[in-house]
Amino acid sequence: MELSEYVQSGLQILADSGCFSPSAYAVLLQTAFQSLLNAQVDRVALDHPVLKHIDPTVLKHCHAAAAACILEAGKHKADKSAISTCLEDCKFDRERIEQFCTEYQKNKDTLELILGSIGRCPLHVTDVSWRLEYQIKTNQLHKTYRPAYLVTLNVENSDSRSHPDVSFSCTMEQLQDLVGKLKDAAKSLERASQM
């Protein structure tokens, strides 16, 4: 498991019993898991009375670090020893590591199911449609008289789930820039496939 310096620093603060009492650590850990596993969990979870004495910036940093560590463990299907090693590097004591691993094992199946449902393949563009619109006035009633292109990219994923089309509006210059970048990408891909 590789964690960024930001995540490691957040975990080191979370490991500090002077900053997070055992009860505050338990609440933050449960909140981190629930925020990942349950879409209905609202932001009020960090307003728990046990966490009131902790600076909100530190609290959010540690919450994000714990969530990132949980996701990284789920992504790699990490076992208890891998998680323990990672947390030991972040100065966690045995008791906190055991608590983290217990909570992880309890939620592991649900976490892996959620991560698996996200998918690994980027969207595939199947079609492009566009139309030209001519804007005469803005919503502030200023006259503009400028053309704009409305572009819609029809996309699909290899897992055959439906995805909403991607739509955007752009000026002629922006569209020409996009077309130029797409041509550059196509040339690079062609060169790479010839090697």
Image (cartoon, grey):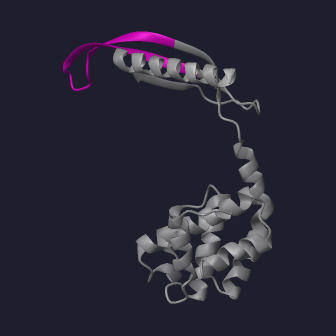
User: What is the quadrant of residue 1 in the picture?
Assistant: bottom right
Work out whether residue 65 or residue 109 is closer to the camera in this orientation and state it.
Answer: 65
Q: Is residue 72 visible?
A: yes
Q: Position of residue 20 (x, y in %)?
A: 53, 84
Measuring 59% from the left and 81% from the top, which residue is drawn there?
Answer: 25
| Depicted 6 relative to depicted 117: above or below | below
Work out whether residue 87 or residue 142 is closer to the camera in this orientation and state it.
Answer: 87
Principal secondary structure, stretch drawn in magenta: strand
Region rendered in magenta:
130-153
Measuring 56% from the left and 67% from the top, which residue is drawn there?
Answer: 65
| Depicted 147 relative to depicted 76: above or below | above
> Left of 103 or right of it: where is 138?
left
Magenta highlight on residue 136: yes
Magenta highlight on residue 62: no
- For the C terminus, the image quarter is top right
Q: Position of residue 45 (x, y in %)?
A: 55, 69
Q: How many marks?
A: 0
User: What is the quadrant of residue 30 in the picture?
Assistant: bottom right
| Depicted 139 relative to depicted 50: above or below | above
Work out whether residue 135 or residue 63 is closer to the camera in this orientation and state it.
Answer: 63
- Furthest toward the left, the residue is 142
| Depicted 115 relative to depicted 104: above or below | above
- Furthest toward the front, the residue is 195
Measuring 77% from the left and 59% from the top, which residue is drawn there?
Answer: 110
Q: Position of residue 158 (x, y in %)?
A: 75, 30
Q: Is residue 171 visible?
A: no
Q: Position of residue 40 (x, y in %)?
A: 61, 57
